[in-house]
Amino acid sequence: MNGVLSTEAGAVLVIGGTGKTGRRVAARLLASGYEVRVGSRHAEVPFDWQDGTTWGAALDGVAAAYVTYHPDLAVPGAVEQVRAFSRLAAERGVRRLVLLSGRGEEAAEAGERAVMESGVPAWTVVRCAWFNQNFDESFFLDPVLAGEVALPVGDAVEPFVDAEDIADVAVAALTEPGHAGEVYELTGPRLLSFAEAVGELARATGRDIRFVPVEVEEYRAVLEAEGLPGDFADLFSTILDGRNASLGDGVRRALGRKPRDFADYAREAAATGVWNA
């Protein structure tokens, strides 16, 4: 199946529908007249990755699904759960699966293969660089507010991608023809070091915000002190080893336009006051 998904075809399940990309996907679908089912533990029809007994009810009457895995597709156990869910989706008659994946993560690519081999008629992989919105909606927000972003990234460069672009591509893949069997590498239009990205935030806010390089073990200790998984520190050294220091063409291939620039994101986010100290 690779035609337009009719608004009468069935619901669209948005797993992680309250997250950075999921809530944007859900809002776009609702605005276009689709029935949206938010996949979360606290939804009216709950969905919990750790409780497979919730999956069947969440899939009832669903024609397409946007699949995100929290905290990351590369964590232990994620691939097995995504494989089981995707096969169940195929058995339940779901016609499209769109998977949010991480760029440069071998473990995440195993999750991609699980979706590709599920038996669902149309799948699309949205493989993304680091999100711009990590700086204003996620784990970099507090450091930005404090005026110091300390990370174990050295001089690594990253083609930061905007969550608005991710949502646009995901919705196109869920509802439009021409995206089945595609792996879209989503990046922004230029490479930036983390120091340069923080500099963009400083310019946009008019504040003194500094980037400070730290060692992996030092950062691990900070994460664990804040009650976060220390393994996240290893993600920096793994995917910021140069493997992602290139631009992808996924936004242009999927949407026919160029991706949003980090500087535009910084200016618009700053205007909301989210980074006012």
Image (cartoon, rainbow, N blue to C red):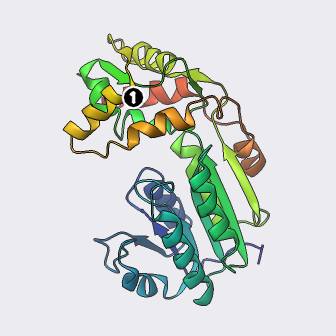
Residue 123 percent location from the top left of the image:
69, 69
What residue did someone put label 1 on? Answer: 216
- Using residue 31 as the reference point, say whether residue 174 is left or right of it: right
Vertical placement of 159 versus 170: above or below? above
Q: What percent of the width, then of the height, locates residue 25?
A: 51, 58
The residue drawn where x is 66% and y is 80% is 95
Query: Local crowd at mark 1 within 10 Å, few (<14), some, or many (≥20)?
Result: some
Q: Which residue is drawn at 40% across and 32% down?
A: 135
In the rendered image, residue 180, in percent from the top left (x then y), is placed at 76, 66
Residue type beneath disc 1: Val
Whether 224 is drawn above or below 64: the answer is above
Give the structural element (helix, strand or loop) at label 1.
Answer: helix
x then y, percent, for residue 20:
43, 50
Q: Quadrant of residue 275?
A: top left
Quadrant for the N terminus in the image: bottom right
Residue at image point 57% right, 82% down: 89
Q: Can residue 34 be seen in this view?
A: yes
Which quadrant does the C terminus fall into? top left
Going 55% across and 31% down the picture, which residue do you hit? 240
Above/below status of 144 relative to 196: below
* Front one among 125 and 62: 125
